[in-house]
Amino acid sequence: MPLSERNKQYNKSPRGKARSQRYRKSCKGVKSNRVRCSRKLEKIRADPERLAKHQERKREWMKGKQAADKVKNDPRNMTCHPVDSEHAIILSDLQIPWEDQQAVELALKFIEWRKPDTVIFDGDIVDCYAMSQFDRDPTKTDSTLDELYRSEKLMQRIKKIKSVKKRIWLAGNHEDRWRKILWREASSSKLSPMVEALMHGLGIEGVDAVESFRRAFRVKENGFEFHPYGHYVELAEGNLIVTHGFMVSQHAAYTAKRHFDRLGKCCIVGHSHRLGFYPVTQMGDPKGAWENGCLARLDPEYVQFPNWQQGFSEVRIKGNLFHVSQIPILPGYKIEFAGRTLRV
Ligand SMILES: [Fe+2]
């Protein structure tokens, strides 16, 4: 077989594809691609007819992209993200910078031990404290930067766990503060220079609240997908929904019940900071809804003696069947699960 044919075959094989992908992502690959593109562009610029066609194509592409982004990033659009997973761990409500670092460390230890293929952040991972409309501590001036660094560190820790192939960050109402503040700015007659500069710095034309969050928090670089508030993940072929949630009741499991009633499906929700299970049997079919607990400190500045519980969920999935285990964090920062005790 001639060498060129052998090369072609190798490039089409999974090993070859992986290698060329690695090359494209490497500094050398990026540089050579940039050189190739700039040479091509030079040729196009030299020919006015080709240049006009190129610009027209670019305009069309931008229009299509903007329309697609509008649908994809619209927070009011309850978009579903089906995930093919056999073993998922769901963490929610850390509310960085109010996270309980020992509880988070324990959850990470649990993930390292259980080796899931998917990790889902189910909202309110960061507090967006600086964007809150409630009373704020005026001495806390570095909170957004702090949130950026700490959430990035968390994503990097999870990225290092080799078994985890899929990492998803679903926004909660706290991440949604970012959108609200930008929309409020954008709706005034003239965009404030600060927002304009921020968007420019992030490489965004106009104002895109969701994309700007993705880029500012370096979500993609740290191996996560980010979806706006209201979007949800479907597990077990659509039999189990994971979403942050939009209602809170005073007592554990009541929030789960209300979400089950509204969504009409088995679901795992965050938001309430409580652990709870609401089982339902419909014509012999066992169903249920779960409240995911939180990993935030139990003594935040904005509420006294909260009725919250720290914890998270593990889901085992086989086809369209699933089993949810709630993992409470016990006093003294320990987890008792599957005959083992985990401590920090
Ligand atoms: Fe929330």
Image (cartoon, rainbow, N blue to C red):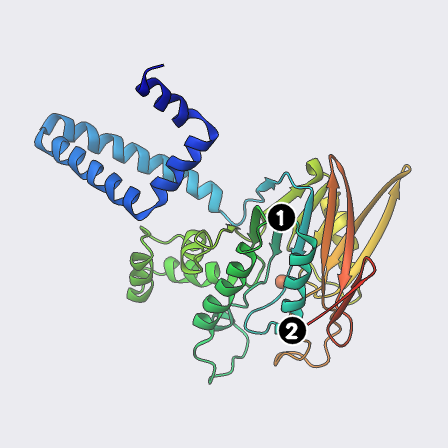
Q: Can residue 199 be seen in this view?
A: yes
Q: Position of residue 216 (x, y in %)?
A: 41, 60
Count the labels in the image: 2
Q: Position of residue 277 (x, y in %)?
A: 81, 56
* Amino acid type at image mark 1: Thr
Residue at the disc numbered 1: 118
**Badge 2 density bin: few <14, some 14–19, many ≥20, Cα 10 Å:** some
Please name whichever residue, 265 or 147, is drawn nearer the observer in this view of the structure.
147
Indicate the quadrant containing the C terminus: top left, top right, bottom left or bottom right: bottom right
**Helix, strand or loop at mark 2:** helix
Using residue 177 as the reference point, say whether residue 201 is left or right of it.
Answer: left
**Badge 1 density bin: few <14, some 14–19, many ≥20, Cα 10 Å:** many
Name the residue rendered at 34%, 40% in the picture: 24
Residue at the disc numbered 2: 102
Using residue 304 as the reference point, say whether residue 337 is left or right of it.
Answer: right
Asked if the residue at label 2 sits under 8 Å from ligand 1, the reply is no
Between the residue at mark 2 and the residue at mark 1, the CA separation in whole angstroms equals: 22 Å
- The answer to whether marks 2 and 1 mark residues whose Cβ atoms lie closer than 8 Å is no
**Helix, strand or loop at mark 1:** strand
Relative to residue 262, is residue 135 depicted above or below? below
Name the residue rendered at 69%, 76% in the picture: 298
